[in-house]
Amino acid sequence: MRIIAGLVVTAAIYCTSVSAETIETRVAFTSAGQEVVGTLAVPAGDPAPVALLLHGFTGSRNELTSDFVKRGVFGYTADQLAKAGFASLRIDFRGSGESTADMSFAETTFEGQVADGMAAVDYLKSLDSIQTDEIHIIGWSQGGLVATAVAGRSDSADAVALWAAVADAQATFGGILGDEVMSAGMQAAPDQSVEVTLPWGPEISLNGAFFDGIETFDPLSEIKAYDGPLFVAQGTKDTTVLPQSADALIAAHEGPEKMWKADMDHVFNVFTTSDALDTLIEQTVSFFNVYAD
């Protein structure tokens, strides 16, 4: 273990070769004194630019799997990024995936995830295996909401890609959770648990503090504080995060930017093909390369 600028960096637990060209390592670092677990993928050769991948609501660092993306949307993305010459770090926010040693998912908050993203940026800056002066951020859905704040507050992102990002938390989570749950959550004390059955089946618990974040967190104000290059991707068939969210993010941002819309749903059509995701990754990489240091 070593400590860099107050950041505790733990040793990798395992290291496996995904291909002859890329090495993946399970890593861990701390955020607010608690453990965050991630996967660092580094292509062979000279130190590469890196992308930090931030997952969505109830997700984890590999993200959604299907027959077309067997390693998950983010696992697949990491592979494609490596082929394009980019390292990547995908993390489990505290309370998600493997980052449950210190807290449960019910304790999840937007601000807590922003802290995790900021800690991940600091962790990347401590590494010798990547280009620490070229850090990019990719956030999907709720991870996109988080990315707006990590970008605006850290002053470390060379470019940001928001994939179907939540721009209006009340509208998006109102649609996911329903009026009854939203009302109960808004009335709950910060540490009071609210039981939720998600539209796609799982039963979860969320504390009142999560609902406080829905009410107060403003991704549009956060992205306004970031004046670097911004890529916003949105599916025209997305019924979870509506297309006007992308328009609002572009309108709020002041700086170089690109909007990319495609005929895809919230999960990039991965249950029927990987084509939309492949094109999305290509568009993202192309945008990053345009603004490379």
Image: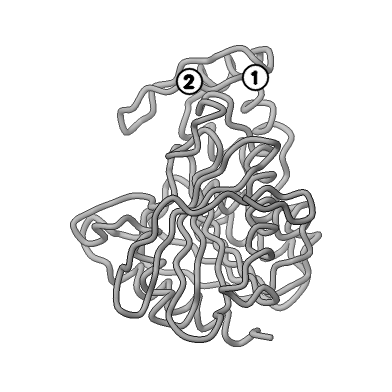
Residue designated by label 2: 205
Residue at (44% x, 20% y) in the render: 196
Q: How many C-alpha atoms fall within 10 Å of the one at disc 1: few (<14), some, or many (≥20)? A: some
Sequence order check, earlier mark of 1 and 2: 1
The CA distance from mark 1 to mark 2 is 14 Å
Q: How many C-alpha atoms fall within 10 Å of the one at disc 2: few (<14), some, or many (≥20)? A: some
Q: Say if 251 sits above or below 65 in the image.
A: below
Residue 242 visible? The answer is no
Amino acid type of disc 2? Ser
Residues at circles 1 and 2 in contact by the CB criterion of under 8 Å:
no
Q: Is residue 46 left or right of residue 44?
A: right
Residue 22 visible? The answer is yes
Q: Say if 94 sits above or below 117 in the image.
A: above
Between 202 and 52, the one nearer to me in the picture: 52
- For the C terminus, the image quarter is bottom right
Residue at (69% x, 65% y) in the render: 125
Percent across and percent down for residue 152 are 76, 58
Local SS, label 1:
helix
Between 87 and 151, the one nearer to me in the picture: 87
Local SS, label 2:
strand
Percent across and percent down for residue 224 are 78, 60
Q: Which mark is residue 186?
A: 1
